[in-house]
Amino acid sequence: MVNDFGAHGGTLLQFSSDDVRSDVEEIRGRGGRIVLEPTETDWGTTSAYVAGPHGVLVELYRFNA
């Protein structure tokens, strides 16, 4: 999977989530900008990216059992 998130501030914050899809919908509902919709990765996670303030990129992830 190759993604171009564009320019960001060089900082990536990662947060574990119990339900990535639900969290993304809540963030979207509050006006947040989703950079990458929830995606199943080859290494066994569900991952999504959100644009944070000042160019920070925020990843929400969940290990799939």
Image (cartoon, helix red, strand yellow):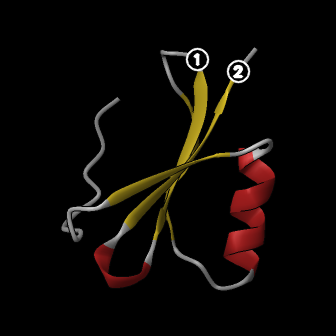
Is 34 on the left-hand or right-hand side of 65? left
Three-letter code, disc 1: Gly
- Quadrant of res 16: top right
- Position of the C terminus, as image quadrant, is top right
Task: Give the percent coordinates (x, y) of residue 50.
Answer: 50, 64
Is 30 on the left-hand or right-hand side of 60? right
Q: Mark 1, residues whose alpha carbon is within 10 Å: few (<14), some, or many (≥20)?
A: few
The local secondary structure at tag 1 comes to loop
Residue drawn at 64 percent across, 85 percent down? 31
Residue drawn at 69 percent across, 60 percent down? 24
Q: Is residue 27 above or below residue 57?
A: below
- Position of the N terminus, as image quadrant, is top left
Along the viewing direction, whichever of 12 and 42 lies nearer the viewer? 12
Three-letter code, disc 2: Asn
Sequence-first disc among 1 and 2: 1
Task: Give the percent coordinates (x, y) of residue 58.
Answer: 46, 60
Label 1 and label 2: CA atoms lie apart by: 6 Å
Q: How many marks?
A: 2
Residue that label 2 marks: 64
The local secondary structure at tag 2 comes to loop
- Quadrant of res 18: top right
Residue that label 1 marks: 44
Is 36 on the left-hand or right-hand side of 17? left
Residue drawn at 25 percent across, 51 percent down? 4
Disc 1 and disc 2 in contact, CB within 8 angstroms: yes
Task: Give the percent coordinates (x, y) of residue 45.
Answer: 59, 26
Q: Is residue 15 above or below residue 43?
A: below
